[in-house]
Image (tube, rainbow, N blue to C red):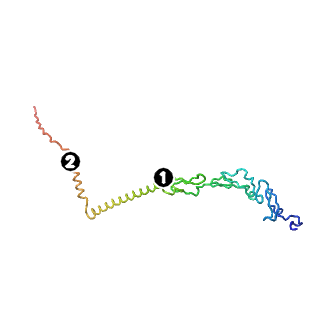
Amino acid sequence: NDSYIGTYCNISSDVCTVAQPCENGGTCFPNDTLLDGHYCECLTGYKGYNCENNEQACTESKCWHNGTCVPINATIASMNGLNFKCECIEGYDGTYCELGIDLCENITCENRGICQTVAMQWKCSCLDSAYYYGDLCQFKTNKLKIREILSSSFAFIAIGVISVTCGFVVVMDVLKYVFHIDPVECERDNYRKRREAQRRARRPIKPNQTKIALRFQYVS
């Protein structure tokens, strides 16, 4: 009889007797029409093909920070000592979703921006908000662009003025010391004459002094 096995043909060969697949006190019923040859009738609070999921594991809130409790297979539960697992929302990790994840760990804000965690999302706070904006503070505002253009313009003007002045001085020195031509000699002499005339004009005019004759008489 194929229904029994063993030395004395005293052991039932159905999968329920041999494998005992139903967990958590579930009752196994042989059924050759099913793929695994059986089905399990689970006790209250357990579900799954082999009654492996303990739904009572999540009757109380065990996950922190709005994590979702999910019953797990009894075999896995026996390995880690827990009959549930927590599916954490973004920003948290750990067995109970108790660990906060630093969302700014791999974020680099530009232009002195500071990364902050706001509403479970990272955000770059731009310190110079009048000059920079964007997710990473990477964009320049129109105010900063205009300021940079004006600064560059003034710099070019200053460089041009300095270059012209230096060129003029070099040309004057070449004319004076190489070709012995002093283009400003006449002007310099005229300037000295005008200064001398102005100094003479400012000198006070002394009035004619009255001459007084004194006669001394000796008395003996």
| Residue shown at the point (82%, 58%) measured from the top left | 27
Report whether residue 207 is seen.
yes
- Residue 169: image location, x then y, percent: 31, 60
- Residue 67: image location, x then y, percent: 67, 53
Q: Residue furthest top?
A: 220
Q: Amino acid at mark 1?
A: Ala
Nearer to me, 22 or 178: 22
Q: Are marks 1 and 2 in contact (CB under 8 Å)?
A: no
Nearer to me, 41 or 202: 41
The quarter holding residue 109 reads bottom right
Report whether residue 74 is seen.
no
The quarter holding residue 54 reads bottom right
Q: Which mark is residue 201?
A: 2
The quarter holding residue 176 reads bottom left
Q: Amino acid at mark 2?
A: Ala
**What crowding class fits label 2: few (fewer than 14 Cα within 10 Å), some (14-19), or many (20 or more)?**
few
Q: Nearer the viewer, mark 1 or mark 2?
A: 1
Q: Quadrant of the N terminus?
A: bottom right
- Residue 136: image location, x then y, percent: 53, 56
Q: Which residue is mark 1?
A: 130
- Residue 81: image location, x then y, percent: 74, 55
In the rendered view, does 169 fall on the left or right side of 110?
left
Q: Earlier in the sequence, mark 1 or mark 2?
A: 1
In the rendered view, does 58 fall on the left or right side of 212?
right
In the rendered view, does 92 fall on the left or right side of 112?
right
In the rendered view, does 152 fall on the left or right side of 16?
left
Nearer to me, 89 or 183: 89
Q: Quadrant of the C terminus?
A: top left
| Dot 2: element | helix
